Amino acid sequence: MPASAPKSEITGYGMRNRLTCGVAVIVLIVIGVVYWPVIHAGFVWDDVLDFVQMGWLRHGDEWKHYIFKDFNNWPNYFRPLVVGLFTLEVRLFDSSPGAMHGVSLAIHLIDTLLVGLLSWQCSSALGDDLKRRTCLLAISMLLYGLHPVLIEPVTWIGCQFDLAATMLMLLGLLANTVIQNHLTRATVVAILFFLAACCKESAVSFPLMIAVFDWALIPRHSEDGRHPIRTFIRRNWQTYTAMFFAGIIYLAFRHWALGQVLNTTGGSSASAFARLQEVCFIYLHYWQTLFWPMHGMNPIHEIDAQRFQTTSASSILIDATAICIVAAGLYSALKHASPMGCIVMMMTVALIPVLHISSIAFAASLYHERYVMTSLAGICAMLPLIRAPIYIRQRQLKFIPSSAVIAGCLWFVLAVVDIRMTLPLWSNNVSFWQWALAGNPDSLDAKDSLLSAYIDTKDYAHAQPLADQLLTEHASCANCMLNIAILAVAKNDPARAAIALEEVRNSKEVAADEQMYRMYLLTTGQMLLLQGHPQDADQIFRAAIELDPLDPQPQLSLATALAMQGKESEARSRAESGIALLSPDMRDSARRALNKAIDLDIKLSQQVNHSEN
């Protein structure tokens, strides 16, 4: 407002500004209420391994190593910022899943607010009045915050990688829009790009997202008569140069930490044409999830890639449609500065890291709903750029706005229902993997993970039939056999455990997977204890501890082996070392159970020694 503006005008402006802030707060409260049940959810999927079984997250300084490499033994993951965040959360909240879910929800709400602020900037750039800007801000925030494709990142703690990276990229887009000083803008955007890349590798798309957003907002008719491309370059070249050097610094940092920029082992051998068909299929699927995400949602999507080696009428149609969408979007964005074309390009460039253009195999699933998150954020922020065509405005078809409102309200109702129906499926590991198996009945990964979830919850009544089914099917799955052996040990059946462990020992997977090998050693030692060979088990447990001194289970099992040998003092010392590595909520019950077992083992050992004497 001008300095000479009447006091009443200033007061009115402030009231309207507070009204806009109030609308934003109400939207955030609605989204928070819809997602609030997630606070009561537990750990699922990799969360169980990362936040329950990983002792280094809770104790000692080993996190200083894992923050840079070897997190979950993933060779291509370099995400130090979020691994550091995980370490802080686990230690601050004592591995409480509710508090960690609260952090995820908080980041999601921040992302939603940033989408709204970017929407406000787009609307302001077009000269919209306050009422329209506020309305578009609310719609953009609601569409992003309640879009069902974001159920996965909000409810799965492990997706804080995605949430944090998206937050930093949105901050970068906002900084690039509001900071006027060229040098300051370039510096801030480059730093945010570097930080986003340190959250997740998908931030590689951020410079292209910046370019699309800049192009969409650049004035087409500047006062000095410059061509839009010249204006675009003049305003942004410092920012792009700074991001280029930030990328070089990131790659050097990554190489220092991992010893390489990218581990290329395990790449696909598919032909170029098969790769093109795969990329087109995934690209169109992500577009489908934007408009109708309720269909086919599942944590895993295992699709046989062999289908892309051949052609059919449907595959050619898919390829042609995907290529036409990209080509039309690029042409209309560059030639006509079309907002819709820019939105298509925003979607496209943000998806580049997850379209399987690279030959590196990052995941077993062909696609994941969460991968569309950054694209969705960019699209929602740019929605105010869309305007009704002139011929529609001229005809004044009043039923179109009302129809759009009805359709939009129906979509939001279905989205909220879908969120509330899906949240319970993410609440615990058993429900999670039952859902995954229902959607992928032939998936060995889903069967194996469900069996593991049953074992973890000591639901042996459901675990045994599933284990029998895997044995009957002669499943070519080393980890399945390992879980069968773990179940057999839990049920005091060393003979069945020996059969399953022999299958594991003869597999190639156990030699290549250090984590599986440690579990193989642990289960073998536990089987030997059941067979009455504590000295042999002792050596195997020590070998497992040497591979990972912060894994509590070999320590606890070694305590039992020592007690069976009559070494009470060493057994109790080793037991305390193992208990200290457990999550806080497990320590008291583990201590009581282990002390009781050690007392019994020592008593039996003394009786055996007495009878021998």
Image (cartoon, helix red, strand yellow):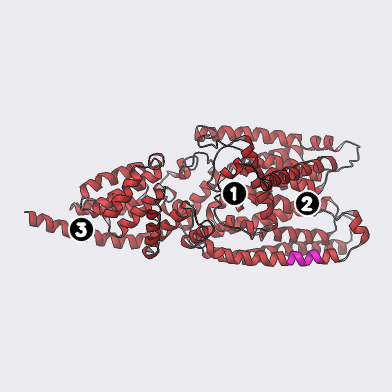
Residue at 62 percent of width and 44 percent of height: 354
Circle number at residue 121: 2
Taking the view exactly as shown, the residue that stands out farthest to the left is 613
All told, the count of numbered labels is 3
Dot 1 amino acid type: Tyr
Q: Is residue 525 visible?
A: yes
Distance of mark 1 from mark 2, alpha carbons? Answer: 32 Å
Q: Amino acid at mark 2?
A: Gln
**Residue kind at label 3, given as amino acid type:** Asp
> Which of the pair 38/573 is nearer the observer?
38
- Give the mark, 2 or 3, whose residue is nearer the N terminus: 2
Chief secondary structure of the magenta portion: helix
Q: CA distance from mark 1 to mark 3?
A: 51 Å
- Tell me where the magenta segment starts and ends, as one range: 403-409
Q: Which residue is mark 1?
A: 367
Q: Which mark is residue 601?
A: 3
Q: Quadrant of residue 406?
A: bottom right
